[in-house]
Amino acid sequence: MPGGSIYVPQDDKFTGASPQQMYEKFWVEGIGERRKMRGVKAAIGLAAGMALAARFSIPQPVLFGIAVAAIVAVADAVVAWYAHERTAVWRGKRKGEVLTGRILRRRLTKEGYKVLNGRAVRGEASIDHLLIGPGGVWIVDNEAFSPETELAQYGGRLFFGEKYGTKMADGLNQAAERLATVLTEKSGIPVTIEALLAVYGGGMPRGGIVSAERLTLLRPRRIPRFIRSRATGALSDEQVETLARTAARELHKIT
């Protein structure tokens, strides 16, 4: 592998493997160890359950201990499944734009927002989702990161692990400005557009939001609540409809 040590022999099974393939390989190889540790945790749960039953005079302490052990085992399995599922978009098993689009439609259309998926100004800018509603206009793009990538901001700059996030922020901000210009010119309604990035995978700080360089990163399920809290534009139902029709007419649909 590039960057490997000249003193450590290369392992042929990793040669040419992508990070996603390596992650999946390690996950499969770790199934046996996870099951073993789950059994240990369940045994501890059994002992703890029986001790609690004896301490508080709970009838049938053995059955109570077994119940506690089962709960521990199921909880451990759910946590492991969830950790693996969070990488599904990064591994290419699921599409972030489909998942985010579904969340936006379910949570915001009933509040008067129009959700247009896959829109572009021909040859200039493209985005995954355009949101137009009573609170204003937003664009939402999707990005998947490896589980080890920490997303943060320092000194007003975005960082994706050890890399700067400036290129992505600039691209989305420019797309927002270009789409805002088109909608304003074609509809006659002045609009500004804020850019959001729906994040799959990676590590987020407590609170689940990172904001810097005029771009906000957050988990997809947080987007509807975030939009409600940040709604500053006052658009009437008629203006929302006009802007949505203008976007559908003037912006290229990405298939």
Image (spheres, rainbow, N blue to C red):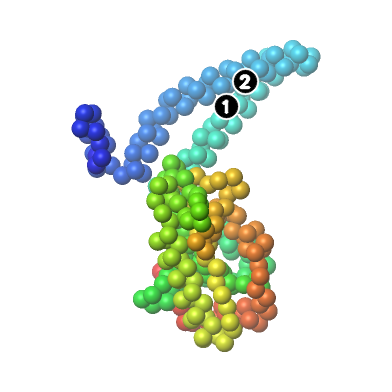
Q: Is mark 1 on a helix, strand or loop?
A: helix
Residue under the point 52% across and 24% down: 38
Q: How far apart are marks 2 and 1 (CA)?
A: 9 Å
Residue under the point 59% across and 58% down: 223
Q: Which of marks 2 and 1 is nearer the N terminus?
A: 2
Name the residue nearer the viewer: 159 or 2. Answer: 159
Classify the position of the N terminus by image quarter: top left
Is 253 left, or right, of 6 in this rendering? right
| Rendered location of residue 234, percent (x, y) | 67, 75
Q: What residue type is labelled 1?
A: Ala
Q: Is 175 placed above or below 76 here?
A: below
Residues at marks 2 and 1 touching, judged by CB atoms closer than 8 Å? yes
Is 147 left, or right, of 53 in this rendering? left
Q: Say which quarter of the image contains residue 211.
A: bottom right
Is 161 left, or right, of 194 in this rendering? left
Q: Is residue 83 visible?
A: yes
Q: Residue 121 carries which label?
A: none
Count residues near mark 1 (Cα–Cα under 10 Å), then give few for <14, some for 14-19, many for 20+: many
Q: Is mark 2 on a helix, strand or loop?
A: helix
Number of numbered discs on residues: 2
Is 169 left, or right, of 229 in this rendering? left
Name the residue nearer the viewer: 48 or 162. Answer: 162
| Rendered location of residue 71, percent (x, y) | 63, 27
Q: Mark 2 points at which residue?
A: 45
Q: Mark 1 points at which residue?
A: 73
Q: Is 7 placed above or below 145 here?
A: above
Count residues near mark 2 (Cα–Cα under 10 Å), then give few for <14, some for 14-19, many for 20+: many
Residue under the point 66% across and 70% down: 232
